[in-house]
Image (spheres, helix red, strand yellow):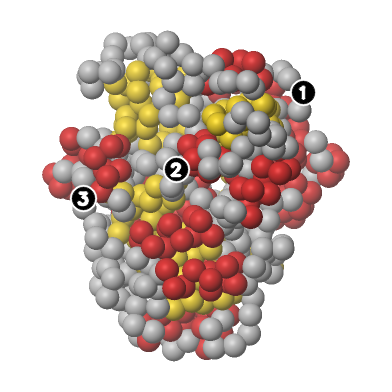
Amino acid sequence: MTALPVRELVPAALRDWWARAGHYPGRTLYELFSEQAAANPDRVAVVDDDGETTYAQLQAATLRLAGALQRDGVEPGEVVAVQLPNGWRPVAVDLAAAAIGAVVLSYPVGRGRRDTLTLLRRSRAAVAVVAHKVGEHHYADALATLRPELPDLRTVLVAGLDGPGSLEGWLADGPPLAAPVGTAASAPARILVSSGSEAAPKMIVYSHDALAGGRGAFIAALHHGDEPMRNLFLVPLASSFGSSGSAVTIARHGGTLLVQSRFDAGRALDLIDTHQPSLVFGVPTMFTMMLDHPRLATTNTSSLRAVVAGGSRVDPATVQACRDRFDTAFVNCYGSADGVNCTTDPLDPPTAVHDAVGRPNPAVAAVRIVGDDDTDVPTGEVGEIWGLGPMSPLCYVDPEFDDRYRVEGGWVRTGDLGRIDADGFLHVVGRRNEIIIRGGRNLSPVEVELLIAQHPAVRQVACVGVTDRLMGERMAACVAVREGAAAPTLTELADYLTDVHGLEHAKLPERLVVLDTLPLSAAGKVDKRWLRERLTGQNE
């Protein structure tokens, strides 16, 4: 038994008040889903590459998988790690784990063996559910090589293979769960993963109530309608942004979830045209690619209430292009896995979307702007953004991050700088941490710098983000080489990072700048601002 140790960092009296105020449903994700399935068994729950899956079909598969996991000895509080492409299968895993009181650690396809080892080892995952192969990446084989370093990992289920260890076999032939395990809605349900500015991923533990209640209120505030939700998620369901798929769209609100296993702009437009979603969730890069795709000209977008962009700031021209060509509202979404969220309203005027990220919703997360002395700054002044509300997580898996990012009363420090204007709108003006947001994904320059620094030819290194229209930002590696050494090319550096250190391709720098020495600030640190300014506008 390797149950996840959990610490509640929000005062109990505050959680109780949120519950009395109606912000929490007070039931587990599986209980909420079961109620939805009983009320509307024939409603389509998931539309994916395989077609349509109804609530009744999803519940039957969920119960068989839950029974198989219970037969395998999975107990309440144990961690089930999941690395699968979007589809109905990861949704079934989420709900099956909830039915037996297990905790899901979901992380997107694309994270390589370094992150997999870190996540599974630190969470002490008892079960891992992975894809056999996605594209040219053999995830099951990679995990097999890590098994000796994961003493807590008892079972591996592989999707896309035949045989006794296949996910498909357990979904089809597992003994149906007789009754869900009694689990408190305040118990842990899911671990969200965020790279942030750390060299290793952060893991944040959320309860059933925080997901269904706090994050449920975030999605509900965007809906503006009485008909069932139909939400198209272009981002991975395993991401923080995508975690509102199974937990919120399906379990809390009984809607239809539309996904594709891998983002394709043309296929996304086909889904809009054929299945008529009301909300589309993606990162700005995805919307830019859809705007540039010829299929948009023949796509019926009349069902759309809004496109919802998160992950990075969006330039006004892209916002207006989305409004004009999708013929719908544009929602600017700010948030993090750490426990803060703020969005504009679909009814907000364009100027509000261009300049701000909305008014904080207390049913989701209240926001404070805090100065260096940890006290609130006056309205309009810039400080660090802190968040606390019904969506607030329980804790981090690693207590060191609790000490670093959580403060008295349960507030989370985001490391982002912002201000709240006289009308209550939150403006994000910068980041204290130096994460690079490429295509909606947080990349840690610290992690890449630590690896490049080990290259035998490198004397100094700094990685910085350079503004890019399509991806938001791209990572540039600025290096100074050792005397007498030949500077590596970008291709040679990429080969070194992937072959020697196992860094996944999504984290590789896309530009290499070789300097005699890196500039230093007055404080003696590498002057990354100078590097960014020098690189801005340069051709690759």
Q: Residues within 10 Å of mark 3 (few under 14, many from 20)?
A: some
Cα distance between the residues tagged 3 and 1? 49 Å
Q: Which mark is residue 47?
A: none
Compare marks 2 and 3 and give the one earlier in the sequence: 3
> Which percent across, then down, holds residue 514?
67, 26
Give me the residue at 29% from left, 17% from top: 371
Q: Which mark is residue 199?
A: 2
Cα distance between the residues tagged 1 and 2? 29 Å
Select label 2 or label 3 by which is in front. 2
Amino acid on which the number 1 mark rests in the picture: Asn
Q: Which residue is mark 1?
A: 539
Count of numbered badges drawn on the protein? 3
Instruction: Classify 104 as above or below 58.
Output: above
Instruction: Classify 520 as above or below 455.
Output: above
Amino acid on which the number 2 mark rests in the picture: Ala
Compare marks 1 and 2 and give the one earlier in the sequence: 2
Q: Residues within 10 Å of mark 2 (few under 14, many from 20)?
A: some
Select label 3 or label 1 by which is in front. 1
Q: Are marks 3 and 1 in contact (CB under 8 Å)?
A: no
Q: Residues within 10 Å of mark 1 (few under 14, many from 20)?
A: few
> Which percent across, then down, holds residue 158?
56, 76
Relative placement, left or right, of 100 versus 498 is: left
Give me the residue at 65% from left, 31% from top: 484
Q: Which residue is mark 3?
A: 8
Relative placement, left or right, of 124 versus 113 is: left
Give me the residue at 42% from left, 63% from top: 120
Q: Are marks 2 and 3 in contact (CB under 8 Å)?
A: no
The reply to whether residue 325 is visible in this rendering is yes
Amino acid on which the number 3 mark rests in the picture: Glu
